[in-house]
Amino acid sequence: MIEEKQERTVIHLEIDNKHYYYGSIAKLCEDNPKEVIGIGYASLRNYGLSETKPYQNSKCIIRKGILHTKSGLRGKKSILDSD
């Protein structure tokens, strides 16, 4: 049986010493308007956010990372069950 390695992109927003985690830049910008974080969706997309290139201004820090999850079969039907 082959286990699939699962990785998901995480966008981390640090603002006012609080930390928030998002699955996409779009959701981060939907929940936090330009007036709050100091940058809009298009500008943040064009910035080229990456693991080695976080975005920072006087209002917040935005980082991109990888969420590593354990592979497993929970919630999936096993190939062996079909025999």
Image (tube, rainbow, N blue to C red):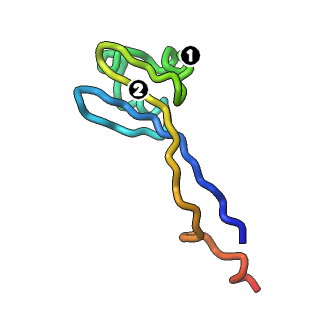
Q: Residue furthest bottom?
A: 83
| Amino acid at the residue labelled 2 | Ile
**Which residue carries the number 2 mark?**
62
Q: Secondary structure at mark 1?
A: helix
Give the answer, above or below, for where 66 lies relative to 82: above
Residue farthest left in this picture: 16
Alpha carbon distance from label 1 to label 2: 14 Å
Answer with the quarter of the image where residue 15 lies.
top left
Looking at the image, which residue is at 50% across and 46% down? 67
Q: State which quarter of the image contains the N terminus.
A: bottom right
Q: Dot 2, crowdedness within 10 Å: few (<14), some or many (≥20)?
A: many
User: Considering the image in quadrants, where does the C terminus appear?
Assistant: bottom right
Left or right, 71 with reference to 31: right
Q: Which quarter of the figure has residue 3?
A: bottom right
Foreground of the two, 56 or 43: 56
Q: Is the C-beta separation of discs 1 and 2 under 8 Å? A: no
Q: Which mark is residue 46?
A: 1
- x 54%, y 27%: residue: 50
Tell me where residue 44 appears, x and y as whole percent: 49, 19
Please state which of the two labelled residues, at mark 1 or mark 2, is closer to the viewer: 2
Q: Earlier in the sequence, mark 1 or mark 2?
A: 1
Q: Name which residue lies at 39% across and 39% down.
A: 21
Q: Is residue 49 above or below residue 71?
A: above
User: At x 52% / y 55%, what residue is drawn?
Assistant: 69
Q: Residue 10's x, y, as percent?
A: 48, 39
21, above or below 60, in the image: below
